[in-house]
Structures are given as C-alpha cells and as structure tokens.
Image (cartoon, rainbow, N blue to C red):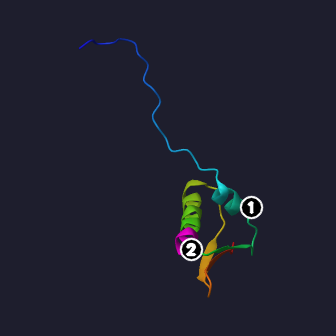
Amino acid sequence: MIVDKNVPVQKGWHRAKKFDDLYHTIHAMDLGDSVFFDDYKEAIRFRGRVSNYRRTEPDFVKDFVIRKLTDGWRVWRTK
C-alpha cells in the first residue's frame, strides 16, 4: 500500500432539502386552505412533511389536520 500525504478531507454528505411540489404547496397555504387527496398514503406523506418542517425550521409555525371524507382525505391548515 502507498501512503498519500497532504490529501484534503472531502466534506461529508448531507441531506439536501427537497424543493418539490409538496414544499411549495405547504409554504403557499394560508390559514383555512386545504388540499384534497384520493390516496391515504399521499395525505399522510403531506402531513409527515409538515412535521419535518416543524422540527427543522425554527420559524415554521403552521399546523395542519387531516380528516377522512367519503371520497378521500383532506388536509387543512389550521394555524
């Protein structure tokens, strides 16, 4: 084996924030706005992303609730 000297250490890998449709939708919603989902997994994914933002963004203070409707699920912004 050959020992290399003075090789700089690369920066570590970090997870980049997703700037996708969910991000833009969540940040664009005003109080009382809602989003309809046909698929329960998509509604839970939306609400989960909100939870992540509440943990990682100090000035993110929005609250959301999810409710079952007859034909799908709806997520409202409540705060």
Measuring 61% from the left and 55% from the top, which residue is drawn there?
58
Q: How many marks?
A: 2
Answer whether residue 58 is magenta in the image. Answer: no
Quadrant in which the N terminus is drawn: top left
Q: Specify the label residue 28 is tagged with.
A: 1
Residue at the far bottom in the pictured view = 70
Q: Amino acid at mark 1?
A: Ala
Measuring 74% from the left and 73% from the top, which residue is drawn there?
33
Determine which residue is flagged by label 2. 39
Q: Amino acid at mark 2?
A: Asp
From the viewer's perspective, tell me whether residue 55 is left or right of residue 63.
left
Q: Are marks 2 and 1 in contact (CB under 8 Å)?
A: no
The disc, 2 or 1, on the residue closer to the chain's N-terminal end is 1
Q: Nearer the viewer, residue 60 or 21?
A: 21
3D distance between C-alphas at marks 2 and 1: 22 Å
- Point out the stretch of residues depicted in magenta: 39-44
Is 17 placed above or below 55 here?
Answer: above
SS for callout 1:
helix
Is 15 placed above or below 54 here?
Answer: above
